[in-house]
């Protein structure tokens, strides 16, 4: 956290100077009338917050963002003695910024970050999961006001990125259309289509780190770009029951590259990579991916990893799968 009372005061002074009507919502009925001045006021504050050279943390900006529950039409009467309404709204704004669809991930994150609980404005400790659920799902806020909060969250992320402040990347956010286990299964065509689309998008983000750390032991007079091998390998690996020979043909049909390797060439060059070199390249790429994920706030707190181990006999007649967690 880098903000101080002085820097916060400087931001408020800058907002009032650059936006003389701020806070615009003070002079408008944002409960029964037009609620969008709330988003305008938040955007003005966010712009000036990140314009300050000492402010380089998204969560810190969120914790200092004024969110008046009265203006959001929040039913404070029943709750003001139990939980701080502004802190509850900020907590849900944090959930939206992080891309979490429910309160479980939010609660776990707050459990792991007690200093953030205080910064959000909770004077007596974190709100329970049930309280957070009721705030968003039990009629405390109208659908329009919820959309205003979502809009503020998107502004917060966009402005943070404009100032090179780490912010979650949308490509890694869950998709509610396929993340409801009671409605869909992994075999549904909708899930498969989304998986293929996400594979392309994730590859676009991960490719620079992979091509920087992976290399092929080839001569200097090669005709096919090295990246074509790794793009083809990613293409083959993300599809079921595809091997090098037919996989490279399928890759050639979909890629925009003029020339790609044949299946036999693909296998020949990949087989030349020794175990030690493969481990080192994998380790370097993994470290780069983790560093990027932490920088973009995609990897925070404790992490649960699932390891799949497939065992088979030489003839391939039996397969046993074991899963473990670390």
Image: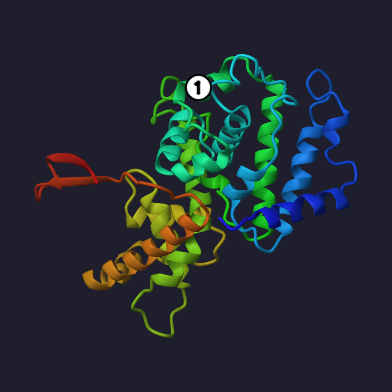
Q: Quadrant of the N terminus?
A: bottom right
Residue that appears at 44% across and 35% down = 105
User: Quick check: 33 above or below 9?
Assistant: above
Q: Residue at x 32, y 65 (%)?
A: 283
Secondary element type, mark 1: helix
Q: How many marks?
A: 1
Query: Coloring scheme of the render?
Result: rainbow
- Residue 273 image offset from top left, x and y in percent: 28, 72
Look at the image and tell me whether residue 260 can be seen: no
The answer to whether one can see residue 56 in this image is: yes
Q: Is residue 167 above or below residue 147?
A: below
Residue 304, given in percent of the width and then of the height, sits at 32, 44
Q: Is residue 104 left or right of residue 45?
A: left
Q: Residue at x 14, y 46 (%)?
A: 311
Task: Return the x and y of residue 177 as percentages of the image width and height.
Answer: 53, 29
Tell me: residue 173, above or below residue 190.
below
Badge 1 local density, few (<14 within 10 Å), some, or many (20+)? some
For this rendering, which residue is in front, 51 or 282? 51
Q: From this view, report whether residue 32 is shown above or below residue 155.
A: above
* Lateral position of residue 180 relative to residue 276, left or right: right
Q: Quadrant of residue 170?
A: top right
Q: Position of residue 275 (x, y in %)?
A: 22, 69
Q: Quadrant of residue 65?
A: top right
Residue sitting nearer the eye, 317 or 212: 212
Closer to the camera, 204 or 224? 204
Disc 1 marks which residue?
131
Q: Is residue 315 left or right of residue 192?
A: left
């Amino acid at each position: 956290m880098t903000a101080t009372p002085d820097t916060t005061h400087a931001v408020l002074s800058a907002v009032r100077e650059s936006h003389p009507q701020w806070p615009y919502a003070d002079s408008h009925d944002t409960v029964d009338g037009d609620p969008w001045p709330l988003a305008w006021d938040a955007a003005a504050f966010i712009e000036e917050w990140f314009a300050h050279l000492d402010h380089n943390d998204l969560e810190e900006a969120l914790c200092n963002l004024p969110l008046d529950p009265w203006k959001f039409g929040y039913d404070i009467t029943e709750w003001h003695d139990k939980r701080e309404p502004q802190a509850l709204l900020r907590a849900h704004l944090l959930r939206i910024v992080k891309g979490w669809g429910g309160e479980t991930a939010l609660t776990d994150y707050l459990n792991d970050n007690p200093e953030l609980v205080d910064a959000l404005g909770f004077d007596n400790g974190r709100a329970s999961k049930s309280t957070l659920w009721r705030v968003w799902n039990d009629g405390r806020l109208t659908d329009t006001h919820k959309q205003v909060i979502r809009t503020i969250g998107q502004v917060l992320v966009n402005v943070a990125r404009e100032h090179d402040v780490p912010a979650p990347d949308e490509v890694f956010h869950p998709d509610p259309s396929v993340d409801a286990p009671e409605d869909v299964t992994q075999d549904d065509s909708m899930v498969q289509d989304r998986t293929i689309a996400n594979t392309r998008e994730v590859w676009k983000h991960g490719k620079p780190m992979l091509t920087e750390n992976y290399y092929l032991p080839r001569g200097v007079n090669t005709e096919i770009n090295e990246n074509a091998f790794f793009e083809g390998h990613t293409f083959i690996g993300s599809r079921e029951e595809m091997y090098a020979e037919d996989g490279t043909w399928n890759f050639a049909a979909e890629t925009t590259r003029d020339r790609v390797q044949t299946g036999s060439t693909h296998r020949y060059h990949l087989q030349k990579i020794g175990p030690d070199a493969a481990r080192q390249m994998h380790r370097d790429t993994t470290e780069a991916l983790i560093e990027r994920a932490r920088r973009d706030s995609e990897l925070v707190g404790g992490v649960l990893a699932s390891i799949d181990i497939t065992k088979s006999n030489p003839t391939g007649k039996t397969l046993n799968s074991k899963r473990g967690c670390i």
